[in-house]
Amino acid sequence: MTQTFSAARRIPTPSAQSYHLICRGEAQATRGAVTPQVQAVHSAIRSKILANDFSCVAARASLNTDCYALGCYGELTADSTAQMLASDLSRFLQDQDRMGSGFTSMIATFDGQTPADEHEFEAALWHLLRAIHRLDDADYSPEVSCDPNDPRFGFSFGGRAFFVIGLHPGSSRLARTFPFPALVLNAHRQFQALRDTGRYGRMQDTIRTRELKGQGNLNPNLADYGEASEARQYSGRAVEADWAAPFPQAPQGRCPFGHS
């Protein structure tokens, strides 16, 4: 079935697609000019993620140490957006390795029509993730499963697993509410490093405490790693008990799109 996306309010984010590394809290002209619109988007991102009610402490740590990249793109579901984001995410894999921090993030923001509600944002998010995965010729990361029915299923790009946090105006979770659509991509390896050093449980407790303080209740999608697919949390919507990520079923040992 073809997914349609209804027209909703238009948010004035940058129309030119660009990619920016950060130095001393300021966006740099890494690929594309730092326009006033880019500065406004960057300021909004920092205000949101550094606010006390934003629960992802990994993303907060990335911003506090300037170890992140900002991408500004067009329509969330446009083919050109997927192509440019895939290119920039490939670049980020290299930039990430040079950042010298245990917490790094790629933050992608989107222009154009904003999805009308949580269901439409979720559909648009997965439309984009499928599109950029089709452009990825790397093996699926062994850190996660490529089977959407596996509790270990997660998103992979460039051979690296990423936890995806979706933000948009229509989210029912206060921590996920944002003036325009955005995705925060955090590499799995930083969470594994926390597990290896015994710090993951403390971070998880901090996230849940922030959720309770900001919302009054925990995100119903939260689960310990391996109990349920992390993909249930990507869009922020409280998904159904039998929900599975809208990726094609993968033959055993292969990724959903047939990569070796």
Image (cartoon, rainbow, N blue to C red):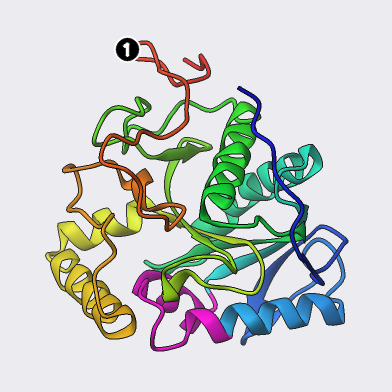
In the rendering, at what x and y percent does residue 135 appear?
66, 30
In the rendering, at what x and y percent does residue 67 appear?
52, 72
Left or right for 233, reference 110: left
Any magenta on residue 208? no
Amino acid of disc 1:
Gln
| 220 w.r.t. 130: above or below | below
| Residue at the disc numbered 1 | 252
In the rendering, at what x and y percent does residue 169 appear?
59, 69
Q: Residue at x 47, y 21 (%)?
A: 248
Magenta segment boundaries in residue numbering: 47-66
| 162 w.r.t. 203: above or below | above
User: Foreground residue, 202 or 125?
Assistant: 125
Q: Residue at x 53, y 37 (%)?
A: 158
Q: Quadrant of the N terminus?
A: top right
* Residue at the top extreme of this rendering: 251
User: Foreground residue, 240 or 69?
Assistant: 240
Where residue 133 sits, quadrant-wise, is top right
Q: Residue at x 47, y 69 (%)?
A: 176
